[in-house]
Image (cartoon, rainbow, N blue to C red):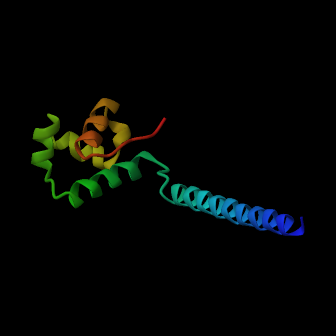
Amino acid sequence: MEALHLTLETQINQLKKIQQQLLNEQLSQKSLLAQNKITDSAEFGQRLNQKRKSLGIDLETLSLQTELSVSTLKRIFKNPAQVKFSSVLLVAEALGVALCTL
């Protein structure tokens, strides 16, 4: 009977360790999300522009892909709040950027 009790106690301790590891992973993921949080539209525009550059897409090519003028693209990258949301969405989709998860 005592051996069974020790086995159960060992299993309970292992489950507690696994639970703690999962909690630590969740906290780590939340911390990463908080660090990557965009706080204003200008920052969002800058990140979109960085993504465009990292993909090696020039403004003229993106203009052809989205059917938006180069000047509109420049405004989006400077401050997307100045442009229609549908235009910002077109650019984000063309760059493979998901705006949010609902």
**Residue 62 location (% of width, % of height):** 15, 45
User: Considering depth in this image, is 64 or 102 the residue closer to the camera?
Assistant: 102
Residue visible at 83% across and 64% down? 4
User: Considering depth in this image, is 23 or 29 the residue closer to the camera?
Assistant: 23
Residue visible at 38% across and 39% down? 81
Horizontal relation, residue 57 to residue 43: left or right: left
Horizontal relation, residue 6 to residue 89: left or right: right
Residue visible at 25% across and 36% down? 90
**Residue 23 location (% of width, % of height):** 66, 59
**Residue 14 location (% of width, % of height):** 71, 66
Instruction: Name the image quarter holding residue 91.
Output: top left
Instruction: Name the image quarter holding residue 30.
Output: bottom right
Total labels drawn: 0
Horizontal relation, residue 40 to residue 1: left or right: left
Compared to residue 84, the image places residue 55 above or below, namely below
User: Considering depth in this image, is 57 or 12 the residue closer to the camera?
Assistant: 12
User: Considering depth in this image, is 90 or 39 the residue closer to the camera?
Assistant: 90
Horizontal relation, residue 14 to residue 36: left or right: right
Residue extending furthest toward the front: 1
Compared to residue 51, the image places residue 68 above or below, namely above
**Residue 24 location (% of width, % of height):** 64, 63
* Figure quadrant of the N terminus: bottom right
Residue visible at 34% across and 49% down? 45
Residue extending furthest toward the right: 2
Instruction: Name the image quarter holding residue 8.
Output: bottom right
